[in-house]
Amino acid sequence: MPGTEAYRTFRIDRLKAPLLVSWQITRECDLSCLHCCTGSAPGKRLSDELDAVEAQSVAEQLISNEVPYVMLCGGEPVMVPHFPALAQQLGTAGVALKIETNGQRLDEALITRLAELPVRSVQISLDADSQSVYVAQRPGGSLQRAHTACRNVHSAGLPLEVTFAPTRVNIHELQPVIERAAALGAFRFNTGQLMRMGTAARRWQTLQPTAQQYRSFRDTLRRARGRAETMNMELSFTPFSIADALRGSLDEPPATLLVLPNGWVKVSAALPHICADLRRHTLQECWARYRSAWRSPEIRTALQAAIDDESSHADSNAWRMTAVH
């Protein structure tokens, strides 16, 4: 009946803090990827991004509230001058880290520093296995530099993940990229349906794979999963789409805070709704507001709409504060 969501008990209600904070520390990037879900690119740094002191303050709260796992991403996180200090601060305190990067600037000195920290994984995007296709999807990028970063990460003893974002440009190179990832020592290969967000949403008509391409894509993934044990690499492509993930989230919201570069906290990646602001609210207040948001009729309705019509995801970066009670 109407209003029953306000009385539901979710798993997140039993947690004193999020299990994961996915922290986009900048919109600045050195590449202009066609498929970027955040709309990051050279010169796209937000004017109000958290500075080094503010980021340090947020990290202190993550540590004091015993958040066990933090993903540092962007944009390109290693372009942020205070990224090494931020990773050091969190890692030294025992927070497990995931670094999401394109690998273009991940040099040996930085990898050596990261190898001293509790890094759960370094995730590098390999969206092609030929330079011509790679640069077509990731203008300004070098596939050789990405491969070198992967090798150096693995050689340093850091867990390597590889991601592949399928588009009409690169989807035909899935199989060689899977094989390349395994050869580079990746323990996991992540992929799924192209997200209709950010830059990808603006280019959707020319970027979205065809139905036939997706059928072949999924067939290739299923065959590769059958060989995962011999490749010594996990193939991860479930849930396949954002809508699939949101269906499960309606019944059990994720114990994750998605923090934007300016400290705003999103309810969900697929929605534009902001439920808190780390400049104004403590982490505990943000966590309480996030949990309340998932019971809000406004958010429940928006989530269902996002499940029913994936074209609505194109508005996910048109951020707006939502009422939280």
Image (cartoon, helix red, strand yellow):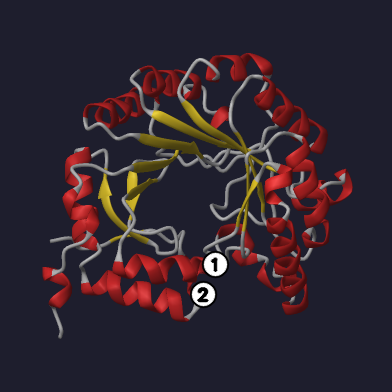
| Left or right for 20, reference 293 | right
The residue shown at (18%, 42%) is: 16
Amino acid type, callout 1: Ser
Question: On residue 174, which mark appears?
Answer: none
What residue is shown with label 2?
310
The residue shown at (74%, 70%) is: 206
Q: Is residue 177 above or below residue 217?
A: above
Q: Quadrant of residue 249?
A: bottom left
Task: Determine whether label 1 and label 2 are within 8 Å by CB.
Answer: yes
Q: What distance separates the C-alpha of mark 1 from that of mark 2?
A: 9 Å
Amino acid type, callout 2: Glu
Q: Where is residue 188 in the image (x, y as percent from the top left)?
A: 62, 44
What residue is shown with label 1?
241
Q: Is residue 170 above or below residue 65?
A: below
Under circle 1, the secondary element is: loop
Whether residue 163 is visible here, answered yes or no, is yes
Q: Is residue 253 above or below residue 280?
A: below
Q: Position of residue 267 (x, y in %)?
A: 33, 58
Under circle 2, the secondary element is: helix
**The N terminus appears in which quarter of the rendering?**
bottom left
Q: Position of residue 72 (x, y in %)?
A: 47, 35
